[in-house]
Amino acid sequence: MNNAQTHTKNVAFYTLGCKLNFSETSTIARSFEHEGFNRVEFHEHADIYVINTCSVTENADKRFKDIVKKAQKINEDAFVIAIGCYAQLKPEELADVHGVDLVLGATEKFNITNYLNDLTKNDLGEVHSCEIEDADFYVGSYSIGDRTRAFLKVQDGCDYKCTYCTIPLARGISRSDTMENVLQNAKEIAEQDIKEIVLTGVNIGDYGKGEFGNKRHEHTFLELVENLDKVEGIERLRISSIEPNLLKNETIDFVSNSDKFVPHFHIPLQSGSNALLKLMRRRYNRELYVDRVARIKSVMPNACIGVDVIVGFPGETEELFLETYNFLNDLDISYLHVFTYSERDNTLAAEMDGVVPIKVRKKRSKMLRGLSAKKRRAFYETQINNSLTVLFEGENKEGYIHGFTENYVKIKAPWNPNLVNTLQDVTLTEIDEDGLVKVAIAGEDLSTTKESSIASVL
């Protein structure tokens, strides 16, 4: 136990950004618990508040300051620590934020409890941040805060040089967990009665590179998938975001025949224009993307396919934006994650000509979000009368319980504690004008949900 602890100290965590950040926050939180700290919720009184930052968009930067203020309102004497991508990219900037006491970089964050010998508030934040070239070792992580699913980190860093992206500057080179450690973590998750694992990383399709500290691939992503499929005790495995050029036919075919890997893929596109993809330095063209979607749908007709897309990238004329819009409109995909381009320091895109006015970026973003809602609704309609399986979650939200089918249809049903963390076979019967669907639960004997339930597909 650290010298700072004469009494048990409370620590709280707040995570911004991606699933990878959530998996790392959970692992870092466990390191505090091993040192004798008591973990509490962020809205509760704590002696230490740890904020895991993101710097993918400008908005994430601004949110950090708001979260620091929230912590100070709860306990103005609390010790505030910043970690994560923003902390690595701009440590001095975060240290200058009023209330921040300690800023840790990409490697230091995993040894966070070593920096807590003195929890006295500082007038100026103290910085411990490595050069990103030193972030060349791997720390395995997984989240277990949600009892129904866990985010399992299998890879970190990226060797791609997309012109808009700061992640290689924040997380370093591409490197992977060992196969042995990934499988051990998966077994530990299974032992805690968690039904679903979501694989996460910066570029998970690159899995195997740097597995033992070298640049070559020791294993492939397909081998990772094949080995995880054999882990006992896990009901579902879900692949998070994977680059289209790294999603191979063999992986798609394996998932289509697996009882554990679910028919859900999230595949970044970023632009439907080959001209813009080239400016972005993406490693594929739109034709390859069409081929990946077609391949998935040919072997898994009910698969859910999510798409990342950036609007307002430098050089995106109205014509090129419409090229992206029409490309997505014609594509058999299920929903979009829309990112409004924001200039990031030390990226090539920030120096490019053809800057798109903010007002235009927002207008285009709104158009694509509308298209996403249309696509999601259309996908859900194709699932009516299908027999699916829902994994129900544990939170009572205003009298309702939520869950996801294997192909990522979100279900909202009347609250029933007997459904929590269970897999239920259901039939989606109809969607009404409010987006409600009647869900018949097969073989149901769950007291408060006889016959059928009214559930909402969101």
Image (cartoon, grey):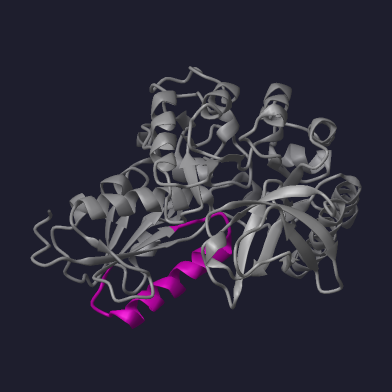
Q: Is residue 107 visible?
A: yes
Q: Is residue 57 magenta?
A: yes
Up the image or down, 235 lies above or below 137; here it is below
Query: Which residue is located at x 37 percent, y 45 percent?
Result: 106
Residue at 31 percent across and 73 percent down: it is: 99
Query: The C terminus is located in which quarter?
Result: bottom right
| Res. 129 visible in picture | no
Look at 46% across and 46% down and name the residue there.
170
Question: In this rendering, is residue 446 above or below 144?
Answer: below
Q: Position of residue 277 (x, y in %)?
A: 76, 40
* Side of 88 relative to 198 (left or right): left
Is 180 placed above or below 200 here?
A: above
Asked if residue 177 lies in the magenta stretch, the reply is no
Residue at the image position 21 percent from the left and 60 percent from the top: 37
Q: Estimate the x, y position of residue 128 in percent, counting from the top left.
A: 27, 51
Is 26 left, or right, of 322 in this rendering? Answer: left
Q: Nearer the viewer, residue 1 or 388?
A: 388
Boundaries of the magenta span: 53-79
- Marks counted in the figure total 0
Image coords of residue 282 (percent x, y)? 70, 36
